[in-house]
Amino acid sequence: MSSAFRSPVPTQTRSHHHRFSASRVRESLTTRFAMCVCSVLLSLLLFAGVIVFILWLSLRPHRPRFYLSSFSVPAVAQPPSALLNSPISFNVTDRNPNGNIGIYYDVVYASVYHRDQLVGSGPVLNPFYQPHKNTTVVVGDLTGTAPAAGDALAAELSGDAAAGRVEFRLELKSVIRFRVKTWDTHHHTLHVQCDVVVGSDGNLLAGYRDKRCSIYFGSL
C-alpha cells in the first residue's frame, strides 16, 4: 500500500510569507496612526476656528446709531430772507451699542440743506470719548443763511411753508476711531444723514421724531 508523498514547504516561501504579513501589519498601523493624527489636527483646527470666530464676534465694532430727537427752524413761517442769521436748532441722540468698545470722536460738524442748498453749518460738538453702551446727545445751534432775493429756492421755501411741509436734510460729520480693550482702531470718517420735515411753524413733524438716521463711512 502506497502512501501519498508530501513535499515539505520550502523555508524561503515561509519566510517570504511572514515578511509579507509583517509588512501589511506595519502599513495598517501606519495608516491608522496617520488617520488618528489627521483627525486630531482637524479637531484642533476646528476648535481654533470656533475660538477665533467667537473672539471676532465679541471684538468686532458695531456702528453707532443716531436718532433725530428734535429740529426747529422758526424762520420758515416768515419770508425767506428771515433765514439770514436766524437760529436752527436740533437734538440728535448718538448711541454706542457696543458692549466692550468705546468710540473717540473728533469735532462734530453739522450742515443743514434745503433742496441741496446749504442753509446753515458749523461745529456743534467738541472732541469727546463715548464709553460702551452709552448715549450722547448732540445739541446743535446753527445760524441760518438766507437764499438770494428772487432765487428759485426762496419761492420754493415759501411755497413749502405755506403747504405746511418743509423738507430739510441734516448732516453730521466727524472722524472717529474705536477703542477695543487697550488698542485703538484706525480712523474712520463718519457721515450721518437725517431726513427732516418741519411744519409751517418750523418744528419737526411728529412722524420724524426719534427717526433713525442713516450713516456711512467715507471721505470728508
Image (spheres, helix red, strand yellow):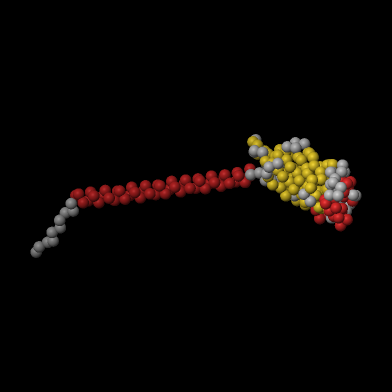
User: Which residue is at a point 84% across and 43% down the rendered structure image?
Assistant: 145
Q: In this view of the protein, which residue sits in the foreground, 138 or 100?
A: 138
- The residue at 29%/51% (across/down) is 21
Q: How many marks?
A: 0
Question: In this view of the protein, can residue 2 be seen by the observer?
Answer: yes
* Residue occupying the point 75% across, 44% down: 172
85 relative position to 54: left or right: right
Front residue of 44 and 91: 91
Q: Nearer the viewer, residue 131 or 171?
A: 171
Location of the N terminus (image quadrant): bottom left
Q: Position of residue 99 (x, y in %)?
A: 69, 44
| Residue located farthest toward the bottom when viewing the structure as drawn | 1
Left or right for 44, reference 185: left
Query: On the rendered structure, is 120 left or right of 189?
Result: right
Q: Is residue 203 visible?
A: no
Q: Nearer the viewer, residue 30 or 144?
A: 144
Q: Identify the image quadrant of residue 129.
A: top right
Residue appearing at x 77%, y 36% in the figure: 126
